[in-house]
Amino acid sequence: MTLPSDLVQSGIVARYEFLKHLRSRRLLGIFILEIAIIALILLIPPLQGQDYPSDPAKFAGMFVQWVWILIVIGSTLFAGDSLVSEFQQRTGYLLFPNPVKKRVLFIGKYAASAGIMFLALAVFYAVVAVFVISVDGSISGLMASSFGLAMLFGVAALSIGYVISSFMKGSTGALILTFALLLLILKIVDGVATASKARPDFSLTFSSGVIGYIMETPYPTDFVQTIDFGGRSFEFANYYPSVTVSIVVAIIYIIVTVALAIWLFDRREMSA
Amino acid sequence: MDDPIVIENLTKDFNGFKAVDSLNLKVERKSFVGFLGPNGAGKTTTIKILTHLLSASGGQAYLNGVDVTKDPKNALAGVGAVVETPEFYPYLTPIETLQYLGSLRGMSNEYIQRRTKEVLETVKMTEWSKTRIGKFSKGMKQRLAIAQAMIHEPHVLILDEPTSGLDPRGMVEVRNILQDLRKGDYTIFMSSHLLTEVQEICESVALIDRGKLLAHGSVATLVEGTGSKDIDVRILQPVDSYVIDRISNFEGVERIVPGDPRHFTITFKGREEDQARLLSEMQTLGLKIVSFKEIGVALESLYMSLIKDSR
């Protein structure tokens, strides 16, 4: 009996991890959230007595601006406790004594998480596309660009979830930290940097704005807004992420966080 | 290197505390070795290093000739392990779990299917084979853990307290499974707190304390080294103090602890021939002996004396 190669083993791990996600209530939860978002956006214009936008890109953009929320929740649920659970739930005692390298386990898990993120986003974009076509009769090619960017940033957010999962001691803490970092902490950093008139290009949340802005024609550009208040003038900067820089930032996040997560997971021991 | 498990100068240092301290041990092929020691002695740490759950601070641990500290993938290829009480993925059934682990080991689908049937029968889990494990009791999980350790027919089984957490019936079942393995080409290295269990399953023991090996050898030899053993005796008729006194005077008898009128325990010092002679002498007293059985206390005495000496 010959041991499979690392590549084959990572495929096996990915297959069973994917099965885990498919059978979990978490995926169902994401789908319910997607339905809720789409339903809400479809209900608001008629309730306000307004028509849906006739421009397919603009109409689709109304949905797409919510994609980052889906990515944050997806990363939390599909990555946040993926590694730490092996230690806390003691499944590592079953898996680690097998002839498989930890980095192979990591790659399998990571691929499965990326696959399930793809599924969640693809379903969202597909449903949105159906509604846009049914209302406007066509869809914008920009949706495909937005979907591609959403996947890239989805994978980057998953990578952050994996780093957190690789060193946290408990699943709950890892889930909360992943969620808080992606939804609150980085957003606060973006706000502080913008208020200081420093472009937060380094921030994943700032860069992820391209997922929605790509739907706008022309693409928005930076501007400074001056507001007079109490006899004084205040300047507020409005920054928009560049598509190219955002893609580079997401790739850097992926490379750095995946390398760090593998390094940490490789060294982590079943000491408890 | 023919011995399937060879440990050389193995050390594990936890921030200055040496859980395993230059441990040396060889486990011969087809032997069943009990790994004994008090809590914190280093048993589980050693087993975790052998199964790549912990890294070693120093030394080597060879499994089938491959150093697990350097090449865990190939070292663990021919090894099955049950460490602590593992948890299973609750969303999988036993069949799916065995399929998963078998695939990781490079087993073909046909081979996995055949072995899955066999091992689930062995651990009496066939009727639960298609039920998701999330609903299983601890005992069922422990039996499944033993099944997964045997799925690939390994020659080496490393077990960390395999009956831990089981009810008495489950313990007996697991012991029977392990004893059945004697028929095959298995080498078993198992830790346990239950000395009677070790004496029942293993023909040799390795005693460890404070990370160091205190003794290693066959149970019979080590127990003989202590010079005394406890024998549980049951008699058909009640015995009076006169008979007890007579037995007390037989050669090798150190003391007698009476139980009920038909039952007593003899602490006896001597070899197996002396023990056979004692039985004959008791029969010459007209006693109708129902049972004359060594009990595990001898190993316990050995254990206690060695642990005491090491501290």
Image (tube, rainbow, N blue to C red):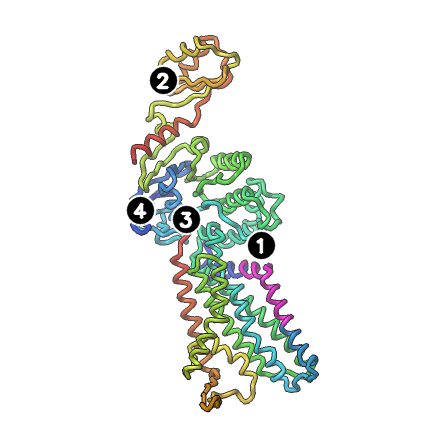
Question: Which span is picked out in magenta?
Answer: A16-36
Q: Quick one: label 4, few (<14), some, or many (20+) residues within 10 Å?
A: some
Q: Earlier in the sequence, mark 2 or mark 3?
A: 3
Q: Verify CB contact (< 8 Å) between mark 3 and mark 4.
A: no
> Which of pointers 3 and 1 lies earlier in the amino acid sequence?
3
> Quick check: B207 above or below A195?
above
Q: x%, y% of residue A205?
A: 48, 75
Query: The disc numbered 4 marks a residue on which chain?
Result: B
Q: Are marks 2 and 3 on the same chain?
A: yes
How far apart, in angstroms, are the residues tagged by discs 2 and 4? 40 Å
Please determine whether, in this image, residue B31 is positioned above or below residue B77: above
Give the mark nearest the N terminus, 3 or 4: 4
The three-letter code of the residue at mark 2 reads: Glu
Cα distance between the residues tagged 1 and 2:
58 Å
Which chain letter goes with mark 2?
B
Residue type highlighted by circle 1: Tyr
Q: Are marks 4 and 1 on the same chain?
A: yes
